[in-house]
Amino acid sequence: GAVAAEWFWLPELEWWPLAPWWSAALISSAMLCLAIVWPSLAYAAWSYSVRRHDVMLSYGVLFRVRRSLPRPRIQHVDVRSGPLDRAFGIVKCTLYTAGTGEADASIPGLVPEVAEALRERLLAQGPMGG
């Protein structure tokens, strides 16, 4: 995008202080740094806890979200992994709740054994953890 902008608009902007391709290099470098740093920030921001009456999720880098899923509404739990997930040895645990046709929440970046144990815990203990 930055290269295209410089190619089409820089000849018309006589006041532009940077030499050609410098803005593209700066924008590309910033995007590369963001692509490297952002996933680790997003991973560090994720947390979940299984409590007696609900599953509490907390996530978000810029905008923090705290979400509670009531245990009685959890209908089924899927453990999924795509090709990239399998390359890193991780899976995503998806929680489906009553009243929705879609997933209500997902917990990414889990080790397969932890995700399976979480799935078994949520389904085997029943809705109130009993």
Image (tube, rainbow, N blue to C red):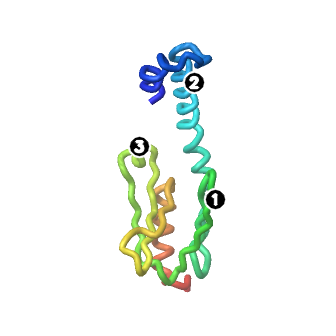
Check disc 2: other Cα within 10 Å, few if <14, some if 14-19, many if 20+.
few
Q: Which residue is mark 2?
A: 26
Q: Locate the N terminus and report the quarter of the image it occupies.
A: top left
Q: Which of the marked residues, 2 or 1, is nearer the chain's N terminus?
A: 2
Residue in front for this viewpoint, 105 or 81: 105
Q: Image point 46% across, 70% down: which residue?
A: 104
Query: Residue 76: which quarter of the image?
Result: bottom left
Q: In the displayed structure, would residue 10 be above or below residue 92?
A: above
Q: Image point 41% across, 62% down: which residue?
A: 79
Please state the horizontal and vertical placement of residue 67, each as a whole percent of the image.
58, 69
Q: Which residue is mark 3?
A: 87
Q: Which amino acid type is marked by label 1?
A: Arg
Q: Locate the C terminus and report the quarter of the image it occupies.
A: bottom right
Given this view, does label 1 or label 3 mark the residue nearer the observer? 1
Check disc 3: other Cα within 10 Å, few if <14, some if 14-19, many if 20+.
few
| Element at label 3 | helix
Please state the horizontal and vertical placement of residue 31, each as a whole percent of the image.
54, 33
Left or right: 128 in relation to 85: right
Q: In the displayed structure, would residue 32 be above or below residue 57?
A: above
For the residues labelled 3 and 2, the Cα–Cα distance comes to: 31 Å
Q: Which of the marked residues, 3 or 2, is nearer the chain's N terminus?
A: 2
Q: Which residue is mark 1?
A: 64
Residue in front for this viewpoint, 72 or 128: 72
